[in-house]
Image (cartoon, grey):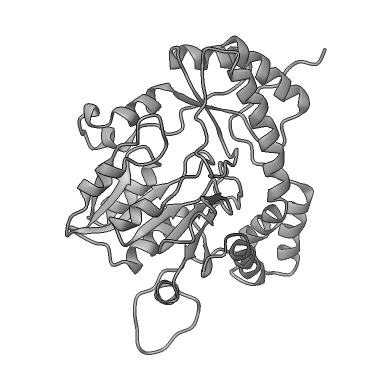
Amino acid sequence: MATQQFLPVYRPTIKRKDLEYVLNTMVADQVSYGEYAKNFERKLFERTGSYNVVAVNSFFNALNLIFETLNIGEGDEVIMPSWIPQIYLNAVMLRKAKAILVDLEEGSLRPNEEQVRQAVSPNTKLLVLYYWFGYTYDPTPYSSYVPNILEDVTTVIGAKAVGETVGTKNLFAVADFSYRSLITTGEGAAVFCNSRKAYHLLRSLIDDDTYNLEYTPRMSCLMPDLNAAMGLSQIESLNHKLKLRDAIGHLYEQALQQSRNSFIPTDDKCDRYYADFPIILKSSLKDTVAYLKKNKIEAVRPFSYPLHQYLNLPKEDFPATEHFYLKTILIPNYSSLSKADVTHVTRIITTM
């Protein structure tokens, strides 16, 4: 019997076609922003239906562009859930703005609607809505409190909630294309603009090698063709990869029903992409991670720390976030897992 290989949580699925696209850009000396990046933007536009899409070279630059477009600066407030990537806190703090953190709804991955309503002030410039692990939820209730909303669709590009594609009904959406993402370009991101005015203002902040004497400072941040080529190939096969992840995710859920642990249910009328697979533990997180590692399966926390811990805010103000932080692990769930790998993981899940 073959020895079971160690299964990491994240393994980018790079196919020969991805490499062919990249090689074509190198052979044609098209390594800066060009036709591949524009084609990648068009494919993202077709998948989501946003007004327009801009592919950029890093997730931080994507956030920075959005914040600059909204003129977010010192004293302005950005409302966001505490349980999201630290990069959001970095982007806010570096602009000397203030992060206003809210908890999640109990037993749900939706930001606490009442806390969002109470957090709004005259200084509020933006609300961040984050879609965790491929789960979607209806974003429309939040728009009655905050006019400017940024949706992070990294794990749900093209998914629908209550009949609408998430990320298309508010001012901006953003997607990260790091190695952990559904689509990876190595490094990079996309900004989805949902109004003509917002799109043209954002584009005016980007250095695109056109110059005139009416000088304004601009950012050099467009995605090179070298990176976009990989993204272009991956978005063409995304539906197939999602189908494979969906099949694996359902097997994991069946296994969890035979264990002491659980998973987060999907909201009614809301799509679920199995971009990641979170398990909600009954037992010790530390012991579970060690047990899985012993069985050659990696398990990690989704985020190193919730943002309220970085800001030394009282943990008792974020009970739902603290629960998820202390009890949630991610396990391997990607389309290149073999049948033997999936069988191994499901067997171990039932014994956890």
Q: Is residue 14 left or right of residue 51?
A: right
The one of 255 and 292 positioned closer to us in this rendering: 255
Q: Is residue 54 left or right of residue 202?
A: right
Vertical relation: 115 (above or below) 210: above
- Give how far across and how far down residue 327 sits, in percent: 42, 22
The part of the image, by quadrant, that contains residue 348 is top right
Name the residue at 28% across, 55% down: 145
- Total marks drawn? 0
> What is the quadrant of the N terminus in the image?
top right
> What is the quadrant of the C terminus in the image?
top right
Q: Most extreme residue toward the bottom, as rendered?
A: 213
Name the residue at 67% across, 25% down: 251
Name the residue at 46% across, 67% down: 194
The one of 82 and 263 positioned closer to us in this rendering: 263
Q: Most extreme residue toward the right, as rendered?
A: 1
Q: Is residue 193 left or right of residue 251?
A: left
Name the residue at 64% across, 56% down: 231
- Give how far across and how far down residue 326 sits, in percent: 38, 22
Vertical relation: 178 (above or below) 343: below
Q: Is residue 307 left or right of residue 190?
A: left
